[in-house]
Structure formats: structure tokens, C-alpha cells
């Protein structure tokens, strides 16, 4: 992924303020009094095991789940007071899963990111074309631009969805597991791109299972466990063996990434005759 960065607005803080969610028919809350702030100019990461509430947090922003209490604000404005178009002007979201329902050419799909900025009957403006062009370059999908979305590989589809969010040019970018299906080079390119966008002032909130990459790239990490915040802070605060072992319920050690010295998690083989012990 490369190319000039342009067209993105400066960030606005995204705040989840004492948010609680309980799905219909469930006794446990999926989120219980969770507060997370993603600041402009930073990459904030939400991590945690399966079922810890990460996607639910993203869904509160889309108002797809009924909140028991709390509020979500963007730039100080409660999203409950905004319509879908207003939200889309402020926040670009790459949801975890999405199938290419209606086959479109990649270029047309990325242009959907401009929808909230266009008038109901207007065509694409010069700004719209420039934003699509820039997003396609940044997401590294120029070669795929004329293809149909239903012919893409998992990794290409993922990057096309990221491009659509970039084309939105919203001050806040939220991505739920954006590097699933990506190989090492494309995964690193996504992290580098998000880092670059954060450094340019955007607010970047990332849900990820890649703890070791998150520890290298994110300036603020929130670790969720069964719908509550188990730890929050920088990598040194969150990437601690005793915390991670309790939350992930698996034996592990936290060591140092040999390249940059960031904390790195190493899961151990856990049971029976294969149980490992860290060497001293
Ligand atoms: P994560 O994204 O961290 O894997 P989720 O936010 O998907 O976690 O889920 C948090 C909890 O809410 C889990 O216990 C999950 O089973 C439950 N949950 C998620 N979606 C629904 C739903 N639509 N209806 C009922 N329970 C749900």
C-alpha cells in the first residue's frame, strides 16, 4: 500500500462512555460499563478473546444493538442524535464480516464510500473521483479496479472494503479485524497505513486479534474480558503475562520482540505431555 495521503479530515475523539449492552434472551451483559476513548492522532486498539464484546462495541456505534446505558460520542456529539448519513460523514467503519451481495466493479464499490457526501441525485464530483483514486492507491488495489467484487480473493475483498472506508474521508476510522485473510506483507501494509493515518491526525480505532502487532503499533490498548475492561493503557501496561494468561485462559509468556523491543506474547503448548515451560 502506498501513494499520497490526502482528502482525510482531521480526527475527532470517539468516546464510548460507560456503555452497557445486553442482547435479548441473554442473562449476561455483552458489555458492562465499558468506557473507551480513541483520540485523534493515535491508533487505539481493542483486543480480547472471542466473545469478550469487541464487535458489540463497534455495533453500538452503528446503533445496531440496544444499549442499557451509556452513550457513544464523536467529536462530543451523541451518535443517538445523528442519522445514518451524519454518522457516515464522521465515522468510516469496516465491519468484521460482509459479503459482496450485489456484484459491482471494484471502482463502483469503493465509490459507495462517497455516498454520504453526495446529493441524492448528483453524480460523482471531482472531489469524489479524487477520494476514490486516493483510496484505491492507498489500499493497494489498483490492479483489481476493473474486477467484479464477487471474483476477489478473501485478502483482496478485505482491502477493497478498507478502500471504501478510506474514500469516505471521515475523521474517525473504525476497523473490526481488518487483517483477517491477509498475508504477512498485506497485514503489515495495513498496520503501516493505519499508523500513517493516525500520525496525520485521524482517529483510528482497531479491533484486532493480532496482539503482537497491536503492541508495536497502537499507542493505546484496551483489553476486554467478558464484557468488561480488564486492562487499558500502553503496551507495557496491557501486555503483561499474568493479565493475558488470566484473560485468554491459556499458558503464555510475554517476551520482547527482537526487532523493536516491544512486548510480544508467546502462547505455550498447554496440556498433557506437550506442556511447555519457559526456559530460564
Ligand atoms: P467478540 O467480538 O469479542 O468476539 P461479541 O461482541 O461478538 O464478542 O460477543 C460478546 C457476547 O455477546 C458473546 O457472549 C456473544 O455470544 C454475545 N452476542 C453477540 N452477538 C449476539 C446476538 N446477536 N445475540 C445474542 N448474543 C450475542
Image (tube, grey):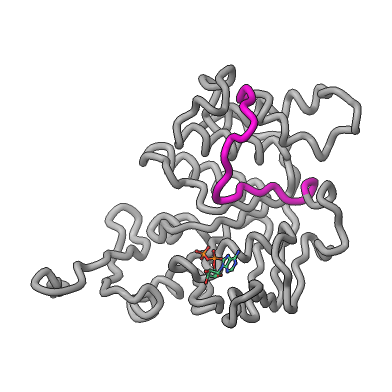
Q: Position of residue 237 (x, y in %)?
A: 45, 75
In which quadrant of the rendered view does residue 135 lie? top right
Residue nearest the observer in this picture, 261 or 76: 76
State whether residue 81 appears in this view. yes
* Most distant residue in the front direction: 25
Residue nearest the observer in this picture, 199 or 190: 190
Q: Position of residue 130 (x, y in %)?
A: 73, 25
Residue nearest the observer in this picture, 105 or 101: 101
Q: Residue at x 71, y 29 (%)?
A: 111
**Location of residue 36 with respect to 128 vertically, above or below:** below
The magenta span reads 88-106
Q: Is residue 107 left or right of residue 206?
A: right
Q: Residue at x 74, y 78 (%)?
A: 69
Q: Residue at x 66, y 74 (%)?
A: 21
Does the magenta portion include 105?
Answer: yes
In which quadrant of the rendered view does residue 43 lie? bottom right
Q: Is residue 175 left or right of residue 74?
A: left
Does the magenta portion include 156?
Answer: no
Q: Residue at x 86, y 53 (%)?
A: 83
Q: Count up the numbered dots.
A: 0
* Most distant residue in the top direction: 146
Amino acid at each position: 500500500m502506498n501513494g499520497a495521503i490526502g482528502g482525510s479530515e482531521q480526527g475527532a475523539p470517539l468516546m464510548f462512555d460507560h456503555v452497557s449492552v445486553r442482547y435479548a434472551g441473554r442473562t449476561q451483559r455483552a458489555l458492562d460499563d465499558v468506557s473507551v476513548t480513541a483520540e485523534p492522532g493515535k491508533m487505539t486498539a481493542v483486543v480480547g478473546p472471542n466473545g469478550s464484546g469487541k464487535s458489540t462495541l463497534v455495533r453500538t456505534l452503528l446503533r445496531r444493538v440496544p444499549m442499557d446505558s451509556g452513550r457513544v460520542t464523536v467529536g462530543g456529539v451523541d451518535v443517538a442524535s445523528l442519522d445514518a448519513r451524519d454518522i457516515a460523514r464522521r465515522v468510516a467503519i469496516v465491519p468484521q464480516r460482509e459479503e459482496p451481495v450485489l456484484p459491482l466493479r471494484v471502482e463502483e464499490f469503493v465509490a459507495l464510500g462517497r455516498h454520504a457526501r453526495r446529493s441524492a441525485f448528483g453524480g460523482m464530483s471531482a472531489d469524489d473521483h479524487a477520494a476514490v483514486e486516493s483510496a484505491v492507491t492507498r489500499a493497494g488495489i489498483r490492479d483489481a479496479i476493473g474486477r467484479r467484487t464477487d471474483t476477489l480473493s478473501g485478502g483482496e475483498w478485505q482491502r477493497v472494503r478498507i478502500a471504501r472506508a478510506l474514500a469516505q474521508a471521515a475523521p474517525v476510522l473504525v476497523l473490526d479485524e481488518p487483517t483477517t485473510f491477509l498475508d504477512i506483507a498485506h497485514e503489515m501494509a495495513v498496520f503501516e497505513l493505519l499508523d500513517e493515518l493516525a500520525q496525520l491526525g485521524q482517529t483510528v480505532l482497531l479491533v484486532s486479534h493480532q496482539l503482537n502487532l497491536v503492541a508495536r503499533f497502537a499507542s493505546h490498548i484496551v483489553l476486554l474480558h467478558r464484557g468488561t475492561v480488564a486492562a487499558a493503557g500502553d503496551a507495557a501496561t496491557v501486555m503483561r503475562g499474568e493479565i493475558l494468561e488470566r484473560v485468554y485462559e491459556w499458558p503464555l509468556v510475554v517476551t520482547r520482540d527482537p526487532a523493536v523491543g516491544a512486548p510480544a506474547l508467546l502462547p505455550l503448548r498447554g496440556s498433557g505431555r506437550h506442556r511447555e515451560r519457559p526456559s530460564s
